[in-house]
Amino acid sequence: MSGYAAPLSEMRFALDAIAGFGEIAALPGYDAAASRETVDAILEEAAKFAAEVLAPLNAVGDRERSRLENGTVHTPTGFKAAYDAFVASGWSALAMPEEHGGQGLPLVLGIAVLEMWTSANLAFSLCPILTQAAVELLATHGSDEQRQLYLPKLMSGEWAGTMNLTEPQAGSDLGAVRMRAIKDGDYYRLTGQKIFITYGEHDLTPNIVHAVLARTPASAPGSKGLSLFIVPKFLVNRDGSLGEPNDIRCLKLEEKLGIHASPTCVLSYGDNGGAIGTLIGEEGRGIEYMFLMMNGARLNVGLQGVAIAERAYQQARDYALNRVQGRPVAAIDEGALPIIHHPDIRRMLLGMRSDAEATRALLYYTAGQIDRARREPDGETRAQHQARVDLLIPIAKAWSTARGFEAASTNIQVHGGMGFIEETGAAQHLRDARISLIYEGTNGIQANDLLTRKLVRDDGAAMHDLIAEMRGLDLAGPDLVGLKKLLRDGIDALEKASESLRKLYRTHQAIALAGAVPFLELFGTVTAGWLTARAALAAGRGYDAEFAAAKRVTAQFFAEHRLATAPALLPAIAGGATVMQLDPDRI
Ligand SMILES: Cc1cc2nc3c(=O)[nH]c(=O)nc-3n(C[C@H](O)[C@H](O)[C@H](O)COP(=O)(O)OP(=O)(O)OC[C@H]3O[C@@H](n4cnc5c(N)ncnc54)[C@H](O)[C@@H]3O)c2cc1C
């Protein structure tokens, strides 16, 4: 079992050199809060909390799991105390809007801190990120009364929030949601069942505020007829105190592959006449409201890829430094040495390190673009950043989580047989990582989104702008010469694939969609290659020589082992017609 130490110098570098934290912190609205001293103090305190409080509970949570007893969910030993300490330290309100009681810091700083919670204890981190989603929903679309009743307690973390979308027949296609909401005076009464609800019931907080997607009787069929409701576990009196329990029951906790400490609940609403809820915004606009907060939610899940890659890398590195086995070829006169001396182990470690850094660069860059899209004073500039965010979100979510899962698998390989044995904890990271490729829109759905909404809808304009910016990166100088050609070949391949897939989609939608996942892979790889090249350049200016050299190695490795494979994806992207030959009626 290994611990976790937040890679603070890497995080600061990604904040400063990749996201452009200095510029972001100076934007109107952030300037007062985000001084250098404040930021350093936040990062250091968070690193301590992650290492000392959350990381030691990770294996406990995996072993003990959350348990359902007589309708109540008990989280594993230590989780309640850790959550209370989390709330008491004010971590819940960190990146929440100031006007509602948050600290009003840049989102990208919140992302750096969330990376630490997630690396330390992925199952724990899900509770605050779902609360954050409920806060965003209410802050943006809630009525004055809803905000007054719920926001302060959700922001502080005193109460937790959830997202109730999924039903047995409605997963990727939320248009199939059946949960009913019938108006009853000032309220609605909800009946139906939701499944897979993360932290749908637990003992961490005295109240849980559910955001529930449901259908009103006269609504249009499909997703256009869906509305969003706030349905608390305990009804809330006008003075904010807790009232009667609402008509919601946790029927079951799912037995899962990983994130065992996170209770994944089947919730039944309205067994005794209807759970009482209030409408968020207007009827029929539920999916629209969900979409508006989707970028943030997808970013948070994409971050799980970074966090797991980092945690797995740290564990593999520590094991490789200590496990003595065999004599490396060059060490003729020596006895057995730690496995880190074997070339293949070094290759795996460098692969994990470069993937952790590349995914971090992608996530922090995207978060920085969100900050700019929110706070730049000029409307046109805000719109340009928003277009960049929308384009990058599918790879921030899908490409990063795929890398996190791979890194967790490589960690097991570095451990050899011990990686397969639960006692080392390597297997937990692999099991925990797997869900990140599925929830918050499966990675296949992200690829569809990238092709249909992000590439086709604007005729490739946002992609064109990004490619032009990538081409503008000046990699002159002998140190990065090998990288330069590989990056150029990758960008050429991305441009070619974007053009051809966009055209193909106009005439043959299904065939084009069959190439969407390899296209997402190409786009993610090239964008990450561009960002790691930028990192190598930036590290050469003003960082110490050892750090700069390490960044050059990472960028070069990424180019040789990842970027170099990008053009080879072109046949798969263009090969949708072959995929479509698999006949559903004859398989
Ligand atoms: C541990 C866990 C926690 C979760 N937490 C929550 C939560 O808190 N709240 C909540 O509401 N939900 C939650 N979910 C649900 C999760 O978001 C869904 O499982 C996910 O969206 C996929 O839906 P599904 O499981 O019904 O799979 P399906 O939609 O049935 O998908 C099955 C396969 O078909 C593919 N597919 C489906 N439609 C398409 C399409 N149009 N094009 C291409 N491929 C397609 C998918 O990519 C996937 O590979 C959670 C799930 C799990 C397992």
Image (cartoon, helix red, strand yellow):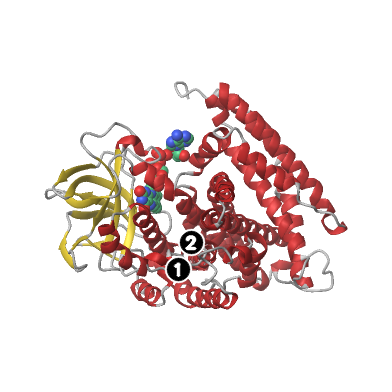
At numbered mark 2, what does the secondary structure look like: helix, strand or loop? Answer: helix
Q: Respond yes or no on whether mark 1 lies under 8 Å from ligand 1.
A: no
Residue denoted by label 1: 58
The percent coordinates of residue 435 (x first, y second) are: 46, 52
Q: How many marks?
A: 2
Q: Residue 545 lies in what quarter of the image?
A: bottom right
Q: Considering only vertical position in the picture, is 520 above or below 147?
A: above
Pointer 2 and pointer 1: residues touching (CB < 8 Å)?
A: yes
Q: Respond yes or no on whether mark 2 lies under 8 Å from ligand 1.
A: no
Name the foreground residue: 403 vs 492.
Answer: 492
| Residue 201 visible from this viewpoint | no
Q: Considering only vertical position in the picture, is 249 above or below 8?
A: above
Q: Which of marks 2 and 1 is in front?
A: 1
- CA–CA distance in space, label 2 to label 1: 9 Å
Mark 1 residue type: Asn
Residue denoted by label 2: 428
Q: Residue 236 lies in what quarter of the image?
A: bottom left
Q: Which of marks 2 and 1 is nearer the N terminus?
A: 1
| Residue 94 visible from this viewpoint | yes
The percent coordinates of residue 13 (x first, y second) are: 66, 67
At numbered mark 1, what does the secondary structure look like: helix, strand or loop? Answer: helix
